[in-house]
Image (cartoon, rainbow, N blue to C red):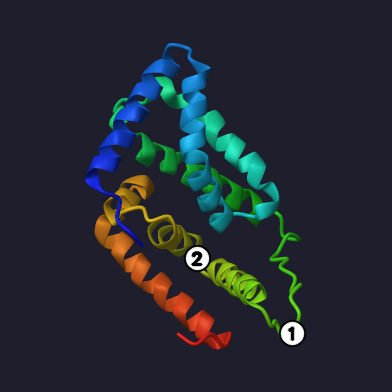
Amino acid sequence: MSAVPDEALKGDRSADSYSIEQCLRGDRQSFRALYQRYQPKVRSMLYQLCDSSSLDDLVQEVFLRVWKGLPQLRQTSQFATWLYRITWNVANDRRRQLASFKDRERNLSQMLPSSPTDRLLDNLHYQDLVRRGLKQLSFEHRCVLVMHDLEEVPQKEVAEILEIPVGTVKSRLFHARAAMRQFLQQAGVQL
């Protein structure tokens, strides 16, 4: 996981601030620029946290909330953190919605052959294992692991997004990694 240089972050933040100012003046092209910049990260986070069958709708919901909420955004330099908070809220709302349906339990099917021979199938198998392992975690642990380890959001930002202390982020990350490691080892993955 490579760190993003400070200059690149500052460049993104000033580009975000400019785009937000233009959006507030009614420039839809500027919102499109924000969407194009952040949609892959939002989609990736939602994919890891939610049921993939409704992924397009969830991404649309995030950006609809962003559009409606832009006038209330006070610090445009904190746009990414604010966006991730909205993404987490949408994922959490979806989790609650799915929990209310007793008949919609985990429905992952094993579509891979029993003895995959090429790298592509091995990679797909590993991705499936990771996804199943993530589903075994509590929502709180999964959020922290996805944001920090998969989306490379710094711990301090994860704490801001989830509105919890950094120490809680570290603790959840530790326990989530341990549970994930145990799940993968039980599945036969050599770590």
Residue placed at 36% from the left, 41% from the top?
81
Q: Is residue 100 left or right of residue 34?
A: right
- Quadrant containing the N terminus is bottom left
Q: Are marks 2 and 1 in contact (CB under 8 Å)?
A: no
Residue placed at 42% from the left, 63% from the top?
145
Image height check: is 79 above or below 160? above
Between 94 and 44, the residue placed more toward the observer is 44
Nearest to N terminus: mark 2 or mark 1 = 1
Question: Closer to the camera: disc 2 or disc 1?
Answer: 1
Within 10 Å of disc 1 (Cα), the crowding (few <14, some 14-19, many 20+) is few
Between 147 and 89, the residue placed more toward the observer is 147
* Disc 2 target residue: 138
Q: Position of residue 139 (x, y in %)?
A: 50, 60
* Disc 1 target residue: 114
Residue placed at 58% from the left, 54% from the top?
47
| Badge 1 amino acid | Ser
* Residue at the left extreme, as displayed: 6
Image height check: is 18 above or below 53? above
